[in-house]
Image (cartoon, helix red, strand yellow):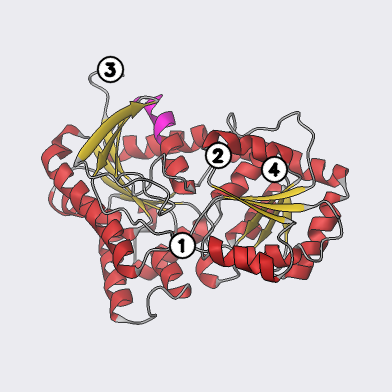
């Protein structure tokens, strides 16, 4: 990278070795961005997600450079339990952006642009003063409607003081930013309507997938239905587990790869449903092994709950399944259904255990249908959602706000 290259700093709550879709997305996007004209720095807390899976760090700052990206880890509270309480979560969410803000107050003059990635919404605290008081361009990258999800899942009371304060803060952040990037157009439209944003400031920057890393393999596929990702409250894994009691294929297995807040409850559900021999919980696995796991499976499942607060959401795992030519069975509402329809890479099903079981059986027994869906999904990902393509669009937005 030339000494006169423009410099951008990205503030993100999650960054590898954190194991989340947002961690891998930020990492891949920044690596691709660094291959171009931009010198990229990431500011993140110590790895702590999924919670309880990492040793706590008490160092004020650590620094490493990987794939051309310099990452500064700034100390923040790291929850130790798998399902932290409210105070532990808030300490994790708030202490990091405050530490990042202090770091930026000292170092912001070195950078030509600042990007803060949400969720959680609190990362905007690190960029807000610079958006209000300086000429440094600030991009707010919004990955989901975090407040809506928190209300819908019962973490905060709808209409209460916390929600109202959060809405005021989020609106201030979004209206102050030079650009707002969103994963889906539904999400962008919602933010424009809700907070009165200038539509021209909102840009579509979808989640994506590294189609070189996630690609089809030549191994024989097994009758496995795979889920990989956060085992959390927004995923309707309950219906998938119950479906396994009705799947006709005797050797079919549901493999849940990952960890999260609801794993213990789901393990109890599998026991109560009498399907412990058909449902496998692998826990966390090295990220580099995930494409191989997809390559061995016959179906990838992306089970969002049917909740209007999630209608904007498209899980990263759906892109990764399709890139590996794995047909997707999806549930939920909104954008996930649109992706399935536009890509031709899967089947959209109601959030119902019996309908899921019927769909699983149909695909497990029809190799030609699986191949057709897999090929369509792969083509769609390469053409529209490769992370190199997404990073190129981010570079154009950065050039625009930096006047290049």
Cα distance between the residues tagged 4 and 2: 12 Å
Q: Earlier in the sequence, mark 3 or mark 4?
A: 3
Residue 292 in sight here: yes
Residue highlighted by disc 4: 377
Residue at position x 86%, y 55% in the image:
249
Cα distance between the residues tagged 2 and 3: 28 Å
Whole-percent x and y of residue 186?
Answer: 51, 61
Residue 38 in sight here: no
Residue highlighted by disc 1: 189
Label disc, if present, on residue 2 of the rendered structure: 3
Query: Going by the picture, which residue comes out furthest to the top?
Result: 2
- Mark 2 or 1: in front is 2
Cα distance between the residues tagged 4 and 1: 26 Å
Residue at disc 4, secondary structure: helix
Q: Is residue 241 left or right of residue 111?
A: right
**Disc 2 to disc 3: CB gap under 8 Å:** no
Residue highlighted by disc 2: 209
- Mark 4 or 1: in front is 4
Q: Earlier in the sequence, mark 4 or mark 2?
A: 2
């Amino acid at each position: 990278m030339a000494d006169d290259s423009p410099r951008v700093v990205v503030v993100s709550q999650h960054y590898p070795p954190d194991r989340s879709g947002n961690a891998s997305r930020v990492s891949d996007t920044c690596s691709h961005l660094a291959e171009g004209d931009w010198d990229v720095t990431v500011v993140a807390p110590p790895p702590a997600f999924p919670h309880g899976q990492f040793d706590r760090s008490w160092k004020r700052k650590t620094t490493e450079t990987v794939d051309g990206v310099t990452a500064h880890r700034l100390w923040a509270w790291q929850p130790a339990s798998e399902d932290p309480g409210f105070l532990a979560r808030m300490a994790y969410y708030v202490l990091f952006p405050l530490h990042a803000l202090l770091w930026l107050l000292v170092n912001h003059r070195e950078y030509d642009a600042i990007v803060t990635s949400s969720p959680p919404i609190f990362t905007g605290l690190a960029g807000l003063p610079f958006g209000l008081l300086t000429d440094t361009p600030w991009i707010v990258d919004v990955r989901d409607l975090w407040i809506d999800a928190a209300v819908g899942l019962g973490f905060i009371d709808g209409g209460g003081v916390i929600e109202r304060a959060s809405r005021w803060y989020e609106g201030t952040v979004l209206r102050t930013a030079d650009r707002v990037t969103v994963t889906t157009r539904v999400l962008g439209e919602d933010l424009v309507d809700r907070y009165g944003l200038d539509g021209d400031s909102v840009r579509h920057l979808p989640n994506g997938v590294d189609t070189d890393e996630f690609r089809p393999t030549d191994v024989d596929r097994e009758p496995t239905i795979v889920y990989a990702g956060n085992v959390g409250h927004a995923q309707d894994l309950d219906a998938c587990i119950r479906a396994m009691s009705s799947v006709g294929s005797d050797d079919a297995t549901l493999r849940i790869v990952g960890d999260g807040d609801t794993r213990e409850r789901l393990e109890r559900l599998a026991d109560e449903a009498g399907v412990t021999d058909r449902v496998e919980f692998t826990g966390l696995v090295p990220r580099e092994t995930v494409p191989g796991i997809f390559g061995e499976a016959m179906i990838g499942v992306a089970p969002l709950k049917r909740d209007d607060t999630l209608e904007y959401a498209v899980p990263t795992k759906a892109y990764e399944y399709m890139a590996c030519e794995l047909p997707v069975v999806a549930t939920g509402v909104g954008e996930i259904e649109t992706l399935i329809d536009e890509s031709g890479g899967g089947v959209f099903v109601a959030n119902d255990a019996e309908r899921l079981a019927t769909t699983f059986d149909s695909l497990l027994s029809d190799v030609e249908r699986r191949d057709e869906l897999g090929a369509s999904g792969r083509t769609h990902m390469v053409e529209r959602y490769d992370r190199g393509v997404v990073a190129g669009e981010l570079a154009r937005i950065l050039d625009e706000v930096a006047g290049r």
